[in-house]
Image (cartoon, helix red, strand yellow):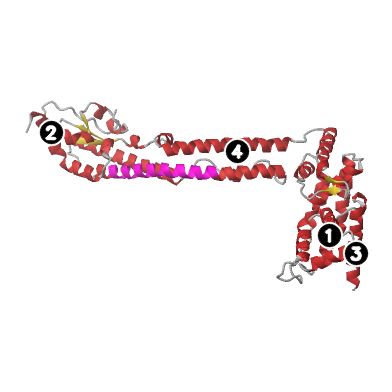
Amino acid sequence: MTSKMKGFFKKRASVQAIPASKGGYLDVSISENHPLLSALPKYPANSIASNIELLPLFTKLLNWLKFHPNTAKYITLFNYTKKLDPKYHEFRQYALKSQITEGFKFISQLEAMINERSEGNSILSDPPHMEISHLNEYHKYWQQAVQQDFIIQLLKFEICEFRNEILIQNKQLAAHLISLLASIDAVPLNFIPYIHFSNLDVPSEVIYARNERCMFLLEQTTKYSNSNMALFKKIDDIYQKYDDSKEIQNARFHTIVASYRLQYDLDCKCLNFAVDPSVFLDFLAHPKSIAYSDVQVYYNNPTPAAFNLLVERIVELFSIKSMEEMSIINSLCSMVFTQVSLPEIKTDGTGTADFDDLMLFGLELFACCDPVSSLKFISDNTDINKPLEYAVNRVIEATKLYTSQWEAFLQYIVDYTISEYLSPKLNSVRFMIMQGISINKNV
């Protein structure tokens, strides 16, 4: 045995006493800087295998390290070279128990992190400005935000899963290290093992920075988050719209109506089918619009009389004088307000499996949905060489192919169109439909 090895077990005449536990070193938390540890020789566990003097003393520890890879770098061994008196044993037990307690607390901390949800809540839990969520423009931006939020949540989930893999590995390492502290003879009595649990406590940012994939996912998360912030700004701008005087709103409304002139059919005095009325609706249905209360009154009781009153109120509120503008407004109102009153009809018509021209005509008529567009569709598809009565009878026969409640659908077209804003051509179609309904009722 070498002189250095003898030194590990040598009893010295001059013995430095371990202070009593009460009010002494047992009240100081265990760390490398503990007064009783800092002055002792220390050896990293991963250096033992290459240390000829230490190697014979740690055969059990080396065997343990062999079956618990990646643990050695977290272990430091402090060598107590003085007499192993009862007070030393008391301190050693205190050091081991304190570290075991610290290890279990650390594992609990890791488990809490593993079980927690990915950072950040979904925007679905708190949508902005719900009072304007019925507006088309809001819906457009909100749908984009929801789609991007879904992507963000997927990105965060993948990032969190990778982080959790590392945390689970560290948790397992911590559990192995606790088992070492609890073992009886893996470490000689004149050595005190110290576990660097703090080195296993790796911040999430450090975990991410060490992985190229995680850094890419974080960049994408930031990109989509910034995009969503821009969408929220647009939604906020929508909410702030029309916070101005009646005169300014009046001018805005006239500009909106004028923008539809290019789609205005002079012959039928209504708009063409391929028109997007969302700007018109968003203006009137905005809580700050001067027409908002009238729109709400209609929605609360969407009868034909209420619809007529709504159109009249809009014309009055915005001082509409031009008949062309009135017809445009009437056509737009037909597109956006009447569908809440569209009757529910059964698909129990007399049609056959053969999809002939009459069935196609009926299908396209039902697809129009709004009353003014329906009149225009009938007018556009009427043979001018045949009497109007023939065209109306064709309408009735076409709707009968789809439903026995064809009268309710045609009555809806009549009830939600205002004759004074219609062209003579559309008024003629409307009148003949009224007659056709009346005749069929009396048959």
Q: Is residue 300 above or below residue 254?
A: below
Q: Label 3 neighbourhood size at 10 Å, few (<14), some (14-19), many (20+)?
A: some
- Discs 3/2, front: 3
Q: Secondary structure at mark 3?
A: helix
Q: Amino acid at mark 2?
A: Ile
Residue identified by numbered label 3: 389
* Disc number for residue 52: 2
Disc 3 to disc 2, C-alpha distance: 114 Å
Please tell me whether residue 165 belongs to the stretch shown in magenta.
yes
Mark 1 or mark 3, earlier in chain: 3
Residue identified by numbered label 4: 228
Q: Amino acid at mark 4?
A: Asn
- The residue sitting at 73% across, 71% down in the picture is 352
Mark 3 or mark 2, earlier in chain: 2
Can you see residue 126? no
Q: Secondary structure at mark 1?
A: helix
Q: Is residue 57 above or below residue 347?
A: above
Residue 198: image location, x then y, percent:
34, 35
Give 172 or 328, whichever is nearer the viewer: 328
Disc 1 to disc 3, C-alpha distance: 19 Å
Residue 213: image location, x then y, percent:
43, 39
Disc 1 to disc 4, C-alpha distance: 42 Å
Viewport quadrant of the N terminus: top left
Q: Amino acid at mark 3?
A: Glu
Q: Secondary structure at mark 2?
A: loop
Q: Which residues are magenta?
A: 151-178
- Discs 1/3, front: 3
* Disc number for residue 412: 1
Q: Secondary structure at mark 4?
A: helix
- Discs 1/4, front: 1
